Image (tube, grey):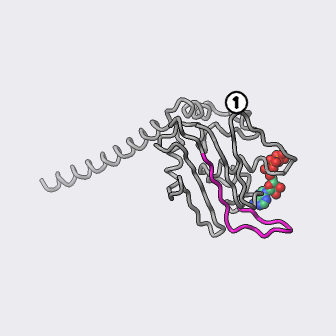
């Protein structure tokens, strides 16, 4: 699995539709300060479901929408799509190629798309669980993040290893099963109460 392309339109400094295509080997994005290099990484974070404006270096989610310049009007929405080659089926879907997209309007209305069909944020998160690519994954190492990992709490470091080992999805499923079990136990208690009242 590898990242084939990133398409951006109206996202941060990218007013026009622009496609970054990645080929074999290493790709470096270079440019002067403030030219938008980090905005490319922000675009990937955002399309993977980032909900925190702060993580995207803004103060509110609307800040991801191109805000205009002296010569250009602001855009009404931001759109990002990433396309991954999935010929090795590392992503648990039968598609050979997966495109995940996100769009947000100034009104706050937003949508996620997977291969052109509307989907939920949860679907995007589940697709990337344990692949290292998700929003919490380690595929994007931000400025200062290595320091943060090294000096962080052992529990936080553990999360990173869990993701790399591919056990996050099992932990999540276990937590959901325990929650369901708990609610069933409470139902059972309630039924027993009712039964003893009837008897
Ligand atoms: P450095 O090398 O200094 O880290 P960089 O190349 O990574 O810089 P970015 O931080 O990606 O640059 O881009 C910053 C630029 O993006 C700024 O010029 C800022 O005005 C612009 N920008 C950010 N959000 C928006 C927005 N919503 N609309 C228009 N421009 C934006």
| Residue named by callout 1 | 150
83 lies above or below 160: below
Residue shown at 76%/68% (left/top)? 74
- Where does residue 100 sit, x and y in percent of width and height? 57, 51
Q: Nearer the viewer, residue 113 or 18?
A: 18
Specify the quadrant of the image occupied by residue 185. Answer: top left
Stretch of the chain drawn in magenta: 64-83
Main secondary structure type of the part rendered in magenta: loop
Specify the quadrant of the image occupied by residue 156. Answer: top right
Is residue 163 found left or right of 177 in the rendered image? right
- Where does residue 93 sit, x and y in percent of width and height? 47, 43
- Where does residue 54 sit, x and y in percent of width and height? 70, 52
4 lies above or below 198: above
Crowdedness near tag 1: few (<14), some (14–19) or many (≥20) residues, C-alpha within 10 Å:
few
- Tell me, yes or no, whether the highlighted magenta stretch contains residue 76: yes
Residue shown at 51%/40% (left/top)? 91
């Amino acid at each position: 699995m590898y990242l084939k392309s990133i398409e951006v339109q109206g996202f941060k400094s990218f007013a026009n539709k622009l496609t970054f295509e990645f080929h074999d080997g290493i790709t470096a994005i270079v440019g002067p300060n403030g030219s938008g290099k980090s905005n490319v990484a922000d675009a990937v974070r955002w399309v993977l479901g980032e909900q925190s404006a702060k993580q995207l270096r803004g103060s509110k989610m609307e800040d991801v929408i191109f805000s205009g310049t002296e010569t250009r009007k602001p855009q009404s929405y931001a759109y990002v799509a990433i396309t991954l080659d999935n010929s090795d089926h590392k992503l648990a879907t039968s598609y050979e190629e997966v495109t995940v997209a996100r769009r947000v309007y100034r009104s706050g209305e937003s949508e996620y798309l997977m291969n052109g069909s509307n989907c939920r944020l949860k679907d995007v998160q589940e697709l990337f669980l344990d692949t290292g690519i998700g929003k919490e994954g380690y595929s994007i190492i931000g400025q200062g993040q290595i320091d943060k990992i090294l000096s962080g709490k052992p529990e936080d470091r553990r999360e990173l290893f869990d993701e790399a080992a591919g056990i996050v999805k099992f932990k999540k499923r276990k937590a959901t099963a325990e929650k369901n079990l708990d609610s069933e136990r409470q139902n059972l208690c309630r039924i027993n109460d009712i039964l003893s009242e009837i008897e």
